[in-house]
Amino acid sequence: MSVSVDPNGRLFTIHTKCSTYQMKADSQNVLLHTYYGPRIDGTDMSYTVTYADRGFSGNPYELGVKDKRYSLDVLPQEMSCFGTGDYRVTGLRVRNADGSRAADLRYTGYTLEKGKYSLPGLPAVHAADDEAETLTVRMEDPATHLQAELLYGVLEDQDIITRAVRITNGGEAPVALEKAASLNVDWQFDSLHQITFQGRHCMERNLVRNPVDHGVRSIGSVRGTSSHHYNPFTIFCQPSATETAGECWGFSLLYSGEFQMETEMEQMGQTRFVCGIHPDNFDWPLAPGETFTTPEVMMSFSDAGLGKLSRNFHTAIREHICRGEWAKKRRPVLLNNWEATYFDFTGDKLVSIAEEAKRLGVELFVLDDGWFGKRDDDNSGLGDWFPNEKKLGCTLRELGRRITDLGLLFGTWFEPEGISEDSDLYRAHPDWAVQIPGRAPNLSRNQLILDFSRADVQDYIIQRMSAVLSDAPVSYVKWDFNRSVCDKFSGALPAHRMGEFAHRYVLGLYRVLETLNERFPHVLFEGCSGGGGRFDAGMLYYTPQIWCSDNTDAVNRLTIQYGTSFGYPVSSMGAHVSAVPNHQTGRVTPLQTRGTVAMAGTFGYELDVTKLTDAGKAEIREQIACFQRFYDLIQSGDYYRLTSCDAPCVAWEFAAEDGGEALVSAVGNRMEGNAPPSNVKIQGLQPDARYEAKICLTEQTPAPMAWFQKELETWEKRNRGLSGAALRNGGLTLPPIWREYQAWQIHLTRLPEGR
Ligand code: DGJ
């Protein structure tokens, strides 16, 4: 059993393979958070909690006279409440019927069950009954009878614990939730660094590492989506933690809307972390008997560094968040026409690209934006999900058939949440667009947003998309969303419930996605929001891959994919080879480099392959064959970051679980004269086995320097027969780089014993 409860039913110890998490209901029925760290025995860790008279940190009334040392303001807690003596950032803020903002939840009981709870209408980690346990801890405010059920899902083997909260108004008067966080973790003594991922459109998930210090640091989004700007994934770690050593805690919020992650170091140097729905656009009335459920947080701990922590999340997302046919099924190598044609295409042009793509080994042709309504630029047509047969020269079904007759799968693009003012849908239903009466709406990409909080809008989109997906032979859908949500207002909500809008929008989005997944289990859904503006574990429950960024520049992608890899697996990251000069940065990189970088993702192409030279086509054929050969290693092997994304030569590795083989990829990031060699410490191999190192994917442009060719000729010979232990500790010195952005892919295979 991964969860143990003491005989009094007050001490709860959760064990995973490498971690222990503990909480205890104390003498006042306050639920103390007593431990989260390396796996220990069942010791009651509340001995670490100290009590002292802390001036200006008040005491509960019943204890004030007897014990001035007991204060909610300094105790580590599982469920912190605003307004009753805890002055730190707190997880729950309510507005009671009398106008007071006070809640005080105390422990009342628990239940322990086999299996993992689910959250109707929300994404949640799933597991078979014998893989997980659910601990439900119940609390209640004795004054108002507001109740909370803290749900903990435990996946012992995966080192994963989840937490969500169900809040019920058990009283007789209405209350409103102003803030309902999913999680509260308190560290009493640790000095910590926090890693967050910030960005912008075309440059998502840049890693930022800061020491935690006094004050409150808050990241989040009030943009309707999880956003390009901050990601709902964060890590805390020891200041000395590296990729391979040190204690680290990771928290991934399964939510695709507005979120907040607050970190506070308080007066005693303790660190509190609170995360959940962003409270700025949230106000949720609860009538007596009504329940609100928060999104889920998935957390993991590693005492072996950041790399191990990331791999815990990779496995959990692949196996316990992604669902359905495509969670495990081999994903096709795709070609998307966006950067090849933008809006400027005809059916014949698309077919000619598809024909060439097929010859090169592509498996799925994706028709991006512009196939519907009046849509020759981004100023009109959104919402009119009827094929533009004049532009295509045929029906979508016929075009799909022409593509599938080539032996390719056919996929297409939707932006279901978008609506253009210049569209038939807007003309018919102006009230379906999100806007505040009497106020001009904020435009972005010259488009508005469909009110996904409304059931009639959700139903319409389900019906319209179903019609298209049933008519044409569609195996893949790219679900895009190209703006932030402003003007938070719904004509379908009364004024006093407008604070529900932002969350109801996300619930509506999830309902549509869930229904379409159920109806079309064979369709592979890829998420997208102007690239990676909604790249979160919540979306991955519905779309097992997400377009990582609108920036396809291979060098910028080193940074974007590096940051993304901390919380998300390679199998979730949409990555394509595009043309040079790159359309976002103007940079020219070798085709080999673009292929190597895209192979650290779901892999595909996004360029007009009919315009390639014969040499370029040959190289793409070789790339696709290479990706197919290493598919399992890349998509489900163990992923190691061998360098940071700022290194002169950026390197990463995929290793087989049994250590029998590994694929090392490296890209020259910064060219310097007389450059020092790059040496990387290879991980995940068997220490005693010996390996052969082979350079795959040949560089098409031969180096002009003779010394370089010579070096290459002897490189494989010199690096043959090295042991896993040598490669781990002495490292592998990479072949030299002779030109900017050159890439290497090196396949390490175990040699039979004695050779
Ligand atoms: C933004 C996406 O990220 C692009 O890949 C492309 O699909 C465009 N939208 C189409 O409008």
Image: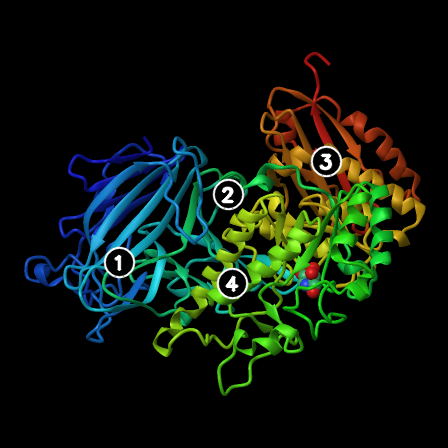
Foreground residue, 238 or 60?
60
Kindly identify the amino acid type of the residue bearing the numbered disc 1: Thr
Q: Which residue is mark 3?
A: 733
Which mark is nearer the camera, 3 or 2?
Answer: 2
Residue 681 in sight here:
no
Asked whether the beta carbons under mark 2 and mark 1 sit within 8 Å of each other, the answer is no
Describe residue 267's horizontal placement relative to residue 141 as left or right: right
Q: What numbered label is drawn on residue 168?
A: 1
Q: Residue furthest top?
A: 754
Q: CA distance from mark 2 to mark 1?
A: 31 Å
Kindly identify the amino acid type of the residue bearing the numbered disc 4: Gln
Q: Residue furthest left?
A: 65
Q: Which of the two labelled residues, at mark 1 and mark 3, occupies the earlier sequence position?
A: 1
Q: Which quadrant is the N terminus positioned in?
A: top left
Q: Which of the two labelled residues, at mark 2 and mark 1, occupies the earlier sequence position?
A: 1
Q: CA distance from mark 1 to mark 3?
A: 60 Å
Above or below 418: residue 209: above
Q: CA distance from mark 1 to mark 4?
A: 27 Å
Which mark is nearer the camera, 1 or 3?
Answer: 1
Q: CA distance from mark 4 to mark 2?
A: 31 Å
Foreground residue, 595 or 700?
595
Q: Which of the two labelled residues, at mark 4 and mark 3, occupies the earlier sequence position?
A: 4
Describe residue 495's horizontal placement relative to residue 371 as left or right: left
> What secondary structure is found at the residue carrying circle 1?
strand
Which mark is nearer the camera, 4 or 3?
Answer: 4
Queried on whether the Cβ of the residue with tag 1 lies below 8 angstroms from ligand 1, the answer reads: no
Which mark is nearer the camera, 2 or 1?
Answer: 1
Q: Which residue is mark 2?
A: 313
